[in-house]
Amino acid sequence: MAIYYLLMGFLIAACSTDKMADNGIDGIIGTWELTALEINDGSASSEAEFAQDILDVLSASDCYLLTLIFNEDLTLVTQDATNYLEIGVNSSGTGLDVPCPVQRDTFTTSYTYVEGTLTFTDENQQSVTVDALINGNTMVISARDLAVENFNSEGNLVFSRR
């Protein structure tokens, strides 16, 4: 019976360490790509549904509109292609034609990440604070809180770590 409690203690300690790593600075270090927009299908606006469709089309072809690179030296590099989207209908008229934007705006700033809260300075020199929930290689941030142009109406932006 003592071995059972010892094993359970190790398992609990291991799980606690993993959870804490996701909430600490080490949990956010790396390159994160915007892969999806999670919305409430029953109550989402048509704008949110359209944004979700765009991200689905682009992600399926390994095209990512927004990349966040969190470095160990507390610099954040943002590569944003949302201003260069060209949206149309495919030649047969049956779906979206969204070519992957070639041009991207790049911005570098500093950040902090403490207990699931991400704070950084945006391009307008405004401090932005958002909840960034990380679970392994998935990070979820409120679309409204992050305010990415064309994807800021509602729902959650889902990033995957490369």
Image (cartoon, rainbow, N blue to C red):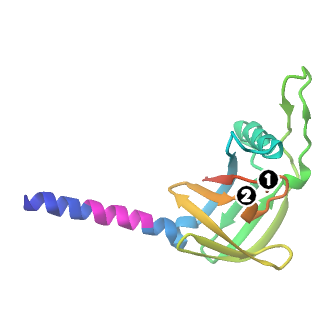
Q: Amino acid at mark 1?
A: Phe
Asked whether, in this view, residue 115 is left or right of residue 143, the answer is left
Q: Secondary structure at mark 1?
A: loop
Above or below, 130 against 33 in this view is below
* Span of residues in magenta: 11-19
Q: Which residue ends up furthest to the top in the rendered image?
A: 92
In-front residue for pair 64/43: 43
| Prevailing SS of the magenta stretch | helix
Asked whether, in this view, residue 44 is left or right of residue 158, the answer is right
Q: Report x, y in % for residue 158.
A: 65, 52
Residue that numbered label 1 is attached to? 151
First reached walking from the N terminus: tag 1 or tag 2: 2
Residue drawn at (70%, 62%) of the image: 68
> In the rendered image, which quarter contains the N terminus?
bottom left
Q: Secondary structure at mark 2?
A: helix
Q: Report x, y in % for residue 48.
A: 78, 46
Above or below, 157 against 121 in this view is above
Q: Report x, y in % for residue 42.
A: 69, 39
Residue that numbered label 2 is attached to? 143
| Mark 1 vs mark 2, CA separation in Å | 6 Å
Task: Say whether marks 1 and 2 touch (CB < 8 Å).
Answer: yes
- Does 52 lie within the magenta span? no
Residue drawn at (60%, 57%) of the image: 139
Characterize the local packing of mark 2: few (<14), some (14-19) or many (20 or more) Cα atoms within 10 angstroms.
many
